[in-house]
Image (spheres, grey):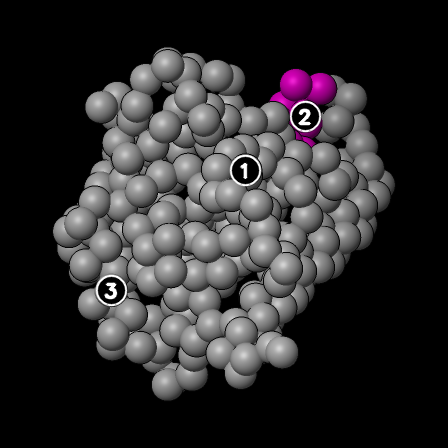
Amino acid sequence: MVSSDQRRRQLAREKFERQQQRREEARRRTRRLTAIIASAVAVVAVIGVGSYVFLDDDGSKGSADAAASASPSASPSASESSAPEPEMAIDKKARYTMALDTSQGDIAIEMDAAKTPHTTNSFKALADKKYFDGTKCHRLTTEGIFVLQCGDPKGDGTGGPGYTIPDENLTSLGKAGDDGAVTYAAGTVAMANTGQPGTGGSQFFLVYKDTKLPPSYTPFGTMDEAGLKAVQKVAEAGVADGAGDGAPKKTVTVEKVTVDKA
């Protein structure tokens, strides 16, 4: 017999996964539209300035590359191919700390490079480029699942670094129960994805209360006590429109992110 509480959690998980899938579909539509626009621009360019293309090959290529990269999102390119993930540059045997200086308090996250080398390396590379600085945590959930989601430069759940990283450490939370879920304990930090394997980018979520989810989101870190309390205070204030899922009422701006060897 399924209890009402279990049913609520199940519905919340299903809603979470549907939203992730819808965001991925939106990204794909954007890429297709970008491809159509790019093709049209290319035709006009060939007709109108064909002589320039042949007279200055290097310059024309630079202009084309700049136009192609000026996408309205950090999604993979219009050709559906993603950029390669950053070259491995961390010590896989070491532990790293990711420090999030936010408008609602500082959050320190301990990362284990041995268990999540690709994830740790990606966050290190992005943080060194100040990729996260000035971004907002765009999503808070307060019903069924209990997370604060951050890491999107666009702030609407569709942004990313232009590449994806593989899933890691998925068995660390134990075997899934009959409901297909495991417990992401309060304090856990994990990668968001589209609901499909190997689709992690830059978005991640901070678990402020034990949450049941399928074991398909890379758990790569743990918040310190002060950081967990800061996220819990954001959650206590609720969602901006009073719903159970949306932008947090207390705006969380990530002012600076650093990743250093512990």
Measuring 22% from the left and 23% from the top, which residue is drawn there?
262
Horizontal and vertical percent for residue 79? 76, 39
**Label 3 or label 2, whichever comes before in sequence order:** 2
Instruction: Quarter of the image for the N terminus: give it.
Output: bottom right
The circle drawn on residue 61 is 2
Q: Which residue is mark 1?
A: 171
**Residue pointed to by mark 3:** 232
Residue shown at the point (25%, 74%) measured from the top left: 236
Q: Which residues are magenta?
A: 56-67
Mark nearer the viewer, 3 or 2: 3
Label 3 and label 2: CA atoms lie apart by: 50 Å
Q: In which image quadrant can residue 57 be found?
A: top right
Alpha-carbon span between mark 1 and mark 3 = 26 Å
**First in sequence: mark 2 vs mark 1:** 2
Q: Residue furthest bottom?
A: 242
Circles 3 and 2: CB atoms closer than 8 Å: no
The mark that comes first in sequence, 1 or 3, is: 1
Give x and y (percent) for residue 177: 59, 56
Tag 1 near tag 3, CB within 8 Å: no
Q: Quadrant of residue 162?
A: top right
Q: Amino acid at mark 2?
A: Lys
Q: Amino acid at mark 3?
A: Gln
Q: Is residue 103 visible?
A: no
Left or right: 96 with respect to 53?
left
Name, please, the residue furthest toward the front.
1
Residue 108 image position (x, y, % from top left): 22, 42
**Relative horizontal placement of residue 17, taking residue 161 as reference (left or right):** right
